[in-house]
Amino acid sequence: MTTDRGSKGAPGNYGCDVLFYVQHLLGIGHIRRAAVLARAFQKAGLKVVFVTGGLPIGDLGFEEVQGLAPIEVVQLPPARAQDETFAVLVDENDRPVDDAWMANRRETLLAVHERCRPRVVMIELYPFGRRKMRFELEPLIAAARESGALIACSLRDIVNRPEKADKAAWMLETFRRGFDLLYVHGDPAFFQLETSFPEAAALSERLYYTGYVTEAGQRLPPPQPDDTGAEDLKAGKGEAIVSVGGGAVGRHLVEAALAARALSPLAEIPWRVLIGPNMPEVDFQKIVAAAPAGIAVERARSDFALLLTRARLSISQGGYNTLMEVLAAGLPGVVVPFAGGTETEQTLRAGRLADQGYLTVVDEANLSGASLAAGIARALETRPLATAKPFRMDGADETARHLIAQLAARDQPQELDA
C-alpha cells in the first residue's frame, strides 16, 4: 500500500498508539462499532485514546485488562443532530451550536492531540459523512500530518452517497489529500464499497477490507448470580428481542411490535423491547405504560449480543451492528430498515441479506402490527443459517493486525538510493 504523504515524524516521540475519533449524531451504532474496534486495539497491545463527540451513552465495555494499557475516553462537548435530516447540530441543551461553541470544541480536540502525540489518528466515517464536523476535523488532520502520524478512516461497508456529484467529488478529494488508509469494515465478497460509492475505485491502493465488525467475538461471560441476580442469567432465553438501537427514530417500530405480539406465531412467549438512550424519557415511559402483559420494556443493555444467543427471534431496525450480532447468533431475524431522510444504507444491506435467505425484511413505509406479525411468520418458516455466514466477521481483530503491520513497516529504516 502506497501513499503520497509526508514525513514519519520523530521516532519514539509518541504518547499513545491510536487516537480514535468518533461522532455519533442520531443513533449509537457508530460509537458502538468504534468501541469494538478500540477494544480489539487494546487487546493487540495498542494504547488507545478514544475521543467521542456525541451525547454520552454509558457503558462502552472499556474494562481495565491486566497487563494492557487502559483505554482513555475523552468526551468532547457533546452534539447531536436535531433530526433525521442532519441539517442542524445542537448541543447537550438542544441549542443550535454557534461559532464560539465550535471554536471551543476545535481547541479542545487539538489540545488532546497535542497531549497524546498519537502514532495513528483514526477518524470514523469522515470524509464519507460527518461533513458538518470539518470545522474541527480538518485542523486535526493538519496537526496529525505535521506530526507524522498515520491517518486512517474507519468506514462501514456502505456509504450514503450524496445526490450531488460535487459533494461526492469533495469526499474523494478530501480523503486523497489527507488520509493514508481506508479501513472498510465489510467483505467485498458480499458487498463492495463501489456499489454504494463508485468513486471508491480510485482509492484501491489505500483501501483495505477488514471483514465485518461484530461484538460477538468480544462477548463477556454471563454475569454471576452474586453480581446481578439469577434472573439476569435467564434474560433472553426463548424470548423475542425487539431492539431499536439508540431509539431516536425507533418509536414506530416499537409501537408496531407491541401490537404484533398477539397477532404473531410467538404470542405465547415473552418479548423484550430494548430502547437506547436517545429516546426521551417521557416517550420511553409512555411505551412502558402501554406495553401489554408478556412484553418487558427496558433501556438498551450492554449484554445485547449475549441475549441474542439465547433468543427465539430478533426484531430490529437494519443497523450494521445489530445485523452482525443477529447473524453471529444464528437466529431468525425480522428487520425494518430505517429509511428516513436520505438514508439508504440499511435498506441496501438488509435487502441483500434477505435475498440470500439470512433474514426477513418488512417495509418501514407500510409498517403495522399486522405486517410485522406476517414478517415474523415468514422468518420462522425459514431455517436459520446458523452454521453459514455470508462474509468474514473478524473485522475488529483484522483491523488491529493490519494497523500494527502498517506501523511496523513505517518504523523500518528507509534504504537510501545508491
Image (spheres, rainbow, N blue to C red):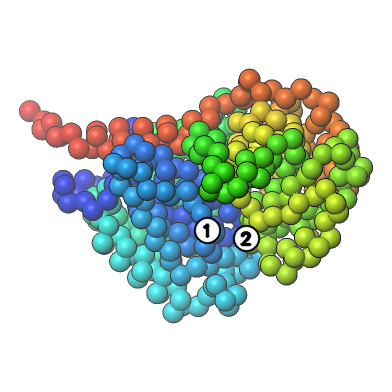
Tell me the kind of residue under disc 2: Pro
Task: Name which residue lies at 55% across and 72% down.
Answer: 92
With respect to residue 298, does 37 lie above or below?
above
Residue placed farthest to the front in the image?
A: 226
Question: Which residue does the image show at 82% across and 56% down from the upper left?
Answer: 291
Examine the rendering and report whether any part of residue 99 can be seen.
Answer: yes
Image quarter of the C terminus = top left
Report x, y in % for residue 350. Answer: 70, 37
Q: Marks 2 and 1: in contact by CB < 8 Å?
A: yes
Q: Residue at x 66, y 23 (%)?
A: 386
Q: Which mark is residue 58?
A: 1
Q: Amino acid at mark 1?
A: Gly
Q: Nearer the viewer, residue 142 or 190?
A: 190
Relative placement, left or right, of 107 versus 264 is: left
Q: Position of residue 185 (x, y in %)?
A: 50, 37
Residue 51 picture quarter:
bottom left
Percent coordinates x, y for residue 19 in the rendering: 35, 52
Q: Could you say which disc has been placed on residue 277 in the image?
A: 2
Q: Residue at x 52, y 58 (%)?
A: 58
**Based on the displayed image, in which of its 4 quarters is residue 25 positioned?**
bottom right
